[in-house]
Structures are given as C-alpha cells and as structure tokens.
Image (tube, rainbow, N blue to C red):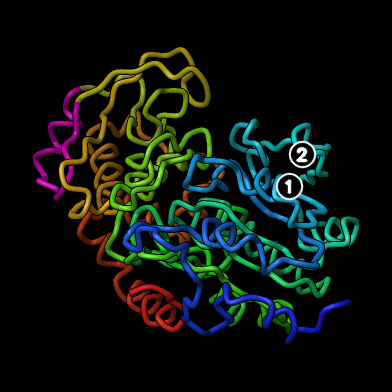
C-alpha cells in the first residue's frame, strides 16, 4: 500500500471491522436515534469519510448505494463532500445508474453528474477487473451494493470478483454493509462445483442468510485462498447498526431501492428464492408483468393449479388464480394462466418449499405443458441435478426438501464463524 502503511490505514479510522473481528466501534452522531437501522454507507458518511482520507478510491456500486437520509447516492455524496479522492466507479449487472435490463450493463463512460470515470465490471473476470483497478490506480475498493440474500442473485459474485481483483493488485477492500432483506437464516441446497456459473460460483446455500460483509469474510477465509492461494491483505467491513438476523426489510425503516429492474418491492425478494427456479422451466416467472416472481404461469394453465397449491396449506402464503400477458421475456403478448403468491405471514413463509411445491404440482397437473429449459439452467439455479431428477421421477415436495437438510446444516455450521450480527 503506497504512501500509507497498513497500520496507518487502520489507525486512521474507528469505522472498520477487521477481518474475523465483530466489533462495531463507530461513533454515532450526537442526538441520533440509536435504535434506527444505519447502513455501512450511512456510518461512513456520518464520519466524513475519514477512513478514506488520503487514498485513491474506487467504488463498486449501483443504484442501491444510497444514504438513508434523503436517498442521495454514496458516489454523489463522496464527490460533493470533497473529502474523497474518487478515481473510478465500477458498475455491475444493470449498471452503476441502473439503466440496463437483466443481462445488460452500461459500458464505460464518464458519469455526467460527477465526471468520474465509470467502468463496466459486469461479466468481467478478475484479471480484467484488476486491469480496470490499475488503469484507475485504485488503492482502496469500496463495495456498496444491496443484495437480496440468494445464491443466484449476481451481486454476491460481483463482490467475489472484486475481491479476487484486489488480491491481484494489492488493493484494500472496504465493504459497506447493508441488511439482508429476507433475514439472516440459511436454507436450501449447496452448489455442486460442477454446476458453477455466473449465477453461482461457490458452495453456499441457495438462501445464504448472510450480509455482504459476512460473505466477504467467508470468501476471504474459505474460497480465495483455495482459488488464488492468497487473501485480500486488508479487508474491512463497516457494519450495519441495529440490524438483527430475525429482521425482514419491512422492519428496518429503510427505503427500498430496487436492486434490479425485476426486484421492485421487498415482497418480490421474499418470494424470489423459490419462484426464480421457474427461470429453469418453460413457465414465465412474471418478467414483463408488474409483479415479477410473484406471478408465475404458462399459456393454458387454469384454476386447478391455484386450487391444488392452496390445498397444501403451506405456511404464510396463499395462491390466487391469475391471468397475465407478459410484455417481454417468455410468452410475450400471450395470455398466460397461473398464480400470484400472496404472503399472509412472511416470517412463517418458506419460499424454497413453496417454489418446489409449485413445480411438483405444475408437472403433475399439466404434464403436456410443463417443461424444463433445454439448457438445464435449472441445475445452475438449484445447484445440483437433484431437483430436476426428483421432480421427473415423481418425488413429493417433502422428499425434495428433505434431500438437502444435511448440506443445509453443514453450511450453517461453516458460516457461523463469519457472522457479525446476532
């Protein structure tokens, strides 16, 4: 670290949570509400970005990188403050300002508002991203993106790539933590490495129940050394204040900023771990409707699906018979029948169980209509071949859910040492 020693960098601030340390010694503004949830970005800004003083800073972020008070963006606030030497912004899928749809990005350009150079990091390998860091001469990589708590949501793998690139360049990494909007519990199957892809690179549970800061700690201790032989030398986390693992987003008092175009509400995030599995089928997962992932269906499906699902008595959810016409993605401009998920008790609701039940019954009721995507994308989403194989053999929802209990338990045990919040 040129110019400032590692010890000096640490001593410059009381903001950080050093690797494998769960301290939260960050001063709060006088007169503030200590019960209110404050994100890592809020706490960094509250202290005038002191931790970044004298450093060349690169920020990996998107539209979710906002401050709670007034919803100003972190990057805009950094530039306006004059306290941060911001040398580059690195945009993930959908882009820094969020103008691109799924699978898209904004390219490389100078941001009209701040004049800061924006680099296109979506899909970049660690080597390519490291080249961008070097081009901008980044010394500290600040990561601030809101996640939705699911293995196949790509931002957690943007974090991993950002950390890989930091290993290659010797840059420090500072993660500004945010709440996991669907809570802090881990559920679901782990990824089999042979199905690793852009929607799941490492062996974590489908619903990981971790924050970005916690994942960074796990990555740095578990996956980076195995893959690169090294860790990020200086990894710090600015933790969220007043968040607990049993809290859903509605309890945080924060404003929801859609992390991607098809994640419009906190309710979308709650159902997403289960209904996104329909991306691996021929059914529409609701893209191109006003309720993506809460609406699922296919042409010629009728009332029987909702009726059969409600008869299961799944906790925390009802299924409304629904008809819709997607405006893009699958079945564009075709009338689809299906269901809308209506959450009655978000805390009792198990989205993975619900998603599995929906798939099992759709295949059972409509064998001539139901089908898997021919590229076996379902294996990448589920993480193994087990879901497709068991559904095709006629297994029940209970059998499929029971099949991942042990690996779910194993993941919970492994992640425990990296958790920052009660």
Q: Quadrant of the N terminus?
A: bottom right
Q: Residue at x 13, y 31 (%)?
A: 307
- Specify whether residue 319 is painted magenta: yes
- Residue 114 occupies which quadrant of the picture? top right
**Secondary structure found at label 1:** helix
- Residue 60 occupies which quadrant of the picture? bottom right
On screen, residue 83 versus residue 411, left or right, reads right
- Specify whether residue 414 is painted magenta: no
| In the rendered image, the vertical position of residue 223 relative to residue 290, given as above or below | below
Q: Which mark is residue 114?
A: 2
Q: Residues within 10 Å of mark 2 (few under 14, many from 20)?
A: some
Kindly give the residue lying farthest to the right in the view shown.
Answer: 135
Q: Give the extent of the magenta segment.
A: 303-320
* Residue 259 in picture, x, y percent from top left: 51, 42
Q: Quadrant of the C terminus?
A: bottom left
Query: Residues at badges 1 and 2 in contact (C-beta under 8 Å)?
Result: yes
**CA gap, disc 1 and disc 2:** 7 Å
On screen, residue 160 versus residue 84, left or right, reads left
Q: Residues within 10 Å of mark 1 (few under 14, many from 20)?
A: some
Query: Relative to the observer, which residue lies in front, 69 or 22?
Result: 69
Q: Which mark is residue 272?
A: none
Q: Which residue is mark 1?
A: 79
Can see residue 392? no
| In the rendered image, the vertical position of residue 9 relative to residue 388, given as above or below | below
Specify which label sits upstream in the sequence, 1 or 2: 1
Query: Relative to the observer, which residue lies in front, 22 or 154?
Result: 22
Query: Relative to the observer, which residue lies in front, 172 or 365?
Result: 172
**Secondary structure found at label 2:** loop
Kindly give the residue lying farthest to the front in the view shown.
Answer: 31
* Residue 284 in picture, x, y percent from top left: 41, 30
Can see residue 367? yes
């Amino acid at each position: 670290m040129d110019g400032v020693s590692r010890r000096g960098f640490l001593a410059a601030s009381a903001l950080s949570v050093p690797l494998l340390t769960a301290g939260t010694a960050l001063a709060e503004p006088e007169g503030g509400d200590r019960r209110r949830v404050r994100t890592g970005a809020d706490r960094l800004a509250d202290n005038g970005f002191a931790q970044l003083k004298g450093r060349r800073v690169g920020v990996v972020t998107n539209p979710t990188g906002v401050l709670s008070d007034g919803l100003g963006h972190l990057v805009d606030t950094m530039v306006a403050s004059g306290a941060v030497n911001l040398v580059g912004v690195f945009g993930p899928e959908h882009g820094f300002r969020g103008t691109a749809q799924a699978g898209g990005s904004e390219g490389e350009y100078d941001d009209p508002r701040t004049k800061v150079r924006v680099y296109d990091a979506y899909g970049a390998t660690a080597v390519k991203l490291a080249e961008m860091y070097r081009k901008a001469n980044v010394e500290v990589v600040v990561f601030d993106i809101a996640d939705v708590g699911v293995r196949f949501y790509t931002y957690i793998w943007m974090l991993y790539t950002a950390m890989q690139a930091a290993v290659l360049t010797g840059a420090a990494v500072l993660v500004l933590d945010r709440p996991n909007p669907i809570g802090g519990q881990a559920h679901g199957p782990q990824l089999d490495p042979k199905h690793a892809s852009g929607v799941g690179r490492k062996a974590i549970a489908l619903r990981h129940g971790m924050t970005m800061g916690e994942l960074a700690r796990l990555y740095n201790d578990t996956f980076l050394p195995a893959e690169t032989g090294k860790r990020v030398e200086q990894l710090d986390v600015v933790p969220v204040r007043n968040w607990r693992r049993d809290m859903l987003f509605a309890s945080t008092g924060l404003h929801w900023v859609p992390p991607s175009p098809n994640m419009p509400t906190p309710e979308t995030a709650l159902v997403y771990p289960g209904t996104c599995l329909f991306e691996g089928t021929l059914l529409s997962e609701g893209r191109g409707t006003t309720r993506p992932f809460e609406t699922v269906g296919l042409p010629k499906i009728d009332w029987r699906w909702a009726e059969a699902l409600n008869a299961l008595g799944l906790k925390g959810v009802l299924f409304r018979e629904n008809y819709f016409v997607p405006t893009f993605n699958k079945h564009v401009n075709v009338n689809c029948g299906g269901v809308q998920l209506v959450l009655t008790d978000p805390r009792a609701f198990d989205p993975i169980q619900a998603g599995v039940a929906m798939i099992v019954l759709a295949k059972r009721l409509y064998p001539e209509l139901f089908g898997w995507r021919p590229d076996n994308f379902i294996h990448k989403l589920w993480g193994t071949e087990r879901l497709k194989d068991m559904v095709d053999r006629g297994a029940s929802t209970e059998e499929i859910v029971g099949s991942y209990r042990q690996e779910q338990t194993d993941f919970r045990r492994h992640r425990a040492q990296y958790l920052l919040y009660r």
